[in-house]
Image (cartoon, rainbow, N blue to C red):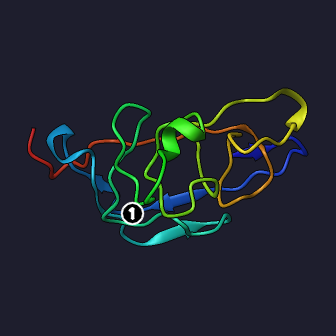
């Protein structure tokens, strides 16, 4: 991920596993963290969208309020790689962000099927 000042940070998990649609894409495992950004992903979180609220807030829907689907924690605004893109790094609560780090200019999220997973 890169912010508007050209700073680049990375996040990597060596055993990132998510479940299927029936289980709302639950994060089953993360494995070992490696990277230069904060380690803030949590396992046992379900994916939330504006029309399928699975976050842990008592009131409201993080995905609807912050304009993007994600595995939200109790703090909706801390991380959302699917948030809105605002030119010139303008901060808004629904901006693309990771752990409240500066507004992100670009993000690349790479997930691949593990070779030992059943097809």
Total marks in image: 1
The residue sitting at the front extreme is 59
Residue shown at the point (8%, 45%) measured from the top left = 118
The answer to whether residue 76 is left or right of residue 86 is: left
Q: Position of residue 14 (x, y in %)?
A: 39, 63
Q: Nearer the viewer, residue 89 or 6?
A: 89
The image shows residue 108, relative to residue 38, as above or below, that is above
38 or 92: nearer the viewer? 92
Specify whether 115 is left or right of 55.
left
> Which picture quadrant has residue 43?
bottom left
Residue 28: quadrant of the picture: bottom left
Q: Indicate the position of residue 13 as horizontal and vertical percent values.
A: 44, 62
Q: Residue at x 58, y 46 (%)?
A: 80
Q: Position of residue 51 (x, y in %)?
A: 37, 31
Q: Which residue is mark 1?
A: 14
Give the vertical position of 37 relative to 59 (above or below). below
Q: In the displayed orientation, state which residue is furthest to the bottom.
A: 32
Instruction: From the viewer's perspective, tell me whether residue 30 is left or right of residue 78.
Output: left
- Along the line of sight, which residue is nearer the eye, 104 or 53? 53
Give the percent coordinates (x, y) of residue 21.
Answer: 20, 38
Badge 1: few (under 14), some or many (20 or more) residues near its Cα, within 10 Å? Answer: few
- Out of 97 and 5, give the one closest to the viewer: 97
Q: Give the residue at x 27% y 46%.
A: 25
Name the image quarter holding the C terminus: top left
């Amino acid at each position: 991920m890169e912010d508007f000042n050209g700073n680049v940070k990375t996040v990597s998990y060596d055993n990132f596993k998510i479940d299927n649609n029936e289980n709302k894409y639950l994060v089953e495992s993360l494995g070992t963290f490696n990277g230069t950004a904060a380690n803030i992903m949590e396992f046992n979180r379900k994916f939330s969208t504006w029309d399928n609220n699975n976050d842990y807030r008592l009131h409201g829907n993080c995905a609807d309020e912050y304009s993007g689907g994600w595995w939200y924690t109790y703090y909706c605004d801390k991380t959302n790689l699917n948030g809105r893109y605002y030119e010139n790094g303008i901060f808004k609560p629904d901006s693309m962000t990771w752990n409240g780090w500066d507004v992100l200019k670009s993000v690349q999220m790479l997930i691949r099927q593990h070779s030992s997973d059943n097809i």
